[in-house]
Image (tube, rainbow, N blue to C red):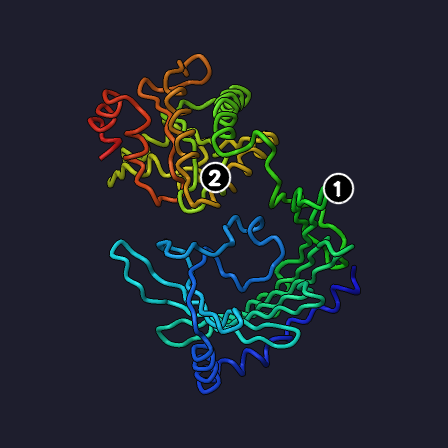
Amino acid sequence: MIDMLESFDPEYLSSELEKYIKPDVLKRISECCYAKTVTWRWASDDMSRKEPFRAELYNTKHEWLKEGARPKPGDLRHGLDNNGRIQVIENYWLNDKRKKEPYSTCYLIYGKSHSDEIQVTNYNSQVMYLRRFRFKAGHPIRSYTQHHFGSVAESHYSYANGKLVTETSVNWKSGEVSARTQRTYECDEWGGLERIIQRYLNEDGSVYEKIAPIIEYERPRKNENLSQLAKQIEPMLLEQILETIEQASPPERFYCLLLCYCEEDFSAGWPPFLLLGSLQERERIMNSSDPQWYLLWAPDEMRNREQNVELPLNDNILERKCAIHCRQMDQIDDYRSGKKILRKVVKKLNKIDWSQTIDVTPDFIVAAIDNTGEKNPYHDIKSAVSWSRFRSLKKQGYLS
């Protein structure tokens, strides 16, 4: 393994990137690619990307849109030549008024054994990155990426009997190695992909044991579609929350239990982590010279205060089901299933007499809150509690 890692070269694309950045070269490439383009097609993803199992790895639909289908935000417009080869990829801002102005463009140049992809912003013709794939017998065997700000990545793909077995990668930042990883692709006896597991590596290529293997993909079982997973996760989540708090038995007095999810990256908070808000902290905030109510419901700030108690949900079965559930939500870019589970769980938790488990205030509530601040906690709390409880919180100044 160490011999292979030593063959990685962070400078491999440097001279090519410098060449492509030159305005005259970039202009010539652009004109050539557009001149070759004879037809345009929309797709849900960059169809020039040749990474094996891209759809499974990045939770995306890697497919062309049907003829006449209306493109959605995130879809890409592809320009193809007479031979059906992609020459141009345009990425558009598609807002409510359906404005169609590309904010970046990728130009593709095809060689005998490789293809280069250059991403260029349209507002100043700045090259964002250069990516190259090298092929052998139709399979990608190397990929290289170099960003204009100095980030570099290289991957080597290994095959056995025509099937991808491993992908070993090294990333550099400002000339220094930032990560060494290896993905293992596990297939069943018929060659179908079962799972993709990522492991971090030491300098000598051995597995870095301090970081647990990461399951990046696992094929759903027969009863693991979106709706079935939601039905399974809801009672598991409810049970795990109750068990976790009961086992922790924190000594403080609390005014809230927050189920913290992540609006901007749902997988980062699925399952959610738990946060108990201390009465002592609430009094500190409200008795300050400038009391700010939103700090009572801001997980990222709250978790840094000693009196508040953060509790993770460490159940392997729940984590696995949430990971598969989230990948399926990612593929349709719709997270309502996860949020619906959270709404149901907090409503059930708000009916529990928490004074039998922990020390709570009379106005103690449970709510699912976005920990990043992307979503106003006011609306999350309003949907979680009864109208009388919500009105009481407002009257006391805990919501505004």
Q: Secondary structure at mark 1?
A: loop
Q: Tell me: residue 285, above or below residue 30.
A: above
Q: Which mark is residue 189?
A: 1
Q: Residue at x 41, y 42 (%)?
A: 334
Residue 212 horizontal side relative to residue 22, left or right: right
In this orientation, which residue lies closer to the viewer: 352 or 36? 36
Q: Are marks 2 and 1 in contact (CB under 8 Å)?
A: no
Q: Which residue is mark 2?
A: 269
**Image quadrant where residue 100 sits:** bottom left
Residue 335 horizontal side relative to residue 59, left or right: left
Q: Amino acid at mark 1?
A: Glu
Q: Amino acid at mark 2?
A: Gly
In this orientation, which residue lies closer to the viewer: 205 or 71? 71
Q: Position of residue 39 (x, y in %)?
A: 43, 69
Please report whichever mark, 2 or 1, sits nearer to the chain's N-terminal start.
1
Q: Secondary structure at mark 2?
A: helix
Question: Crowding near pointer 2: few (<14 within 10 Å), some, many (20+)?
Answer: some
Distance between the alpha carbons at the discs numbered 2 and 1: 34 Å
- Asked whether the viewer can see residue 154, the reply is yes
Q: Position of residue 309 (x, y in %)?
A: 47, 31
Callout in the foreground (2, 1): 1
In this orientation, which residue lies closer to the viewer: 62 or 81? 81
Q: Position of residue 354 (x, y in %)?
A: 41, 16
Q: Residue at x 47, y 78 (%)?
A: 36
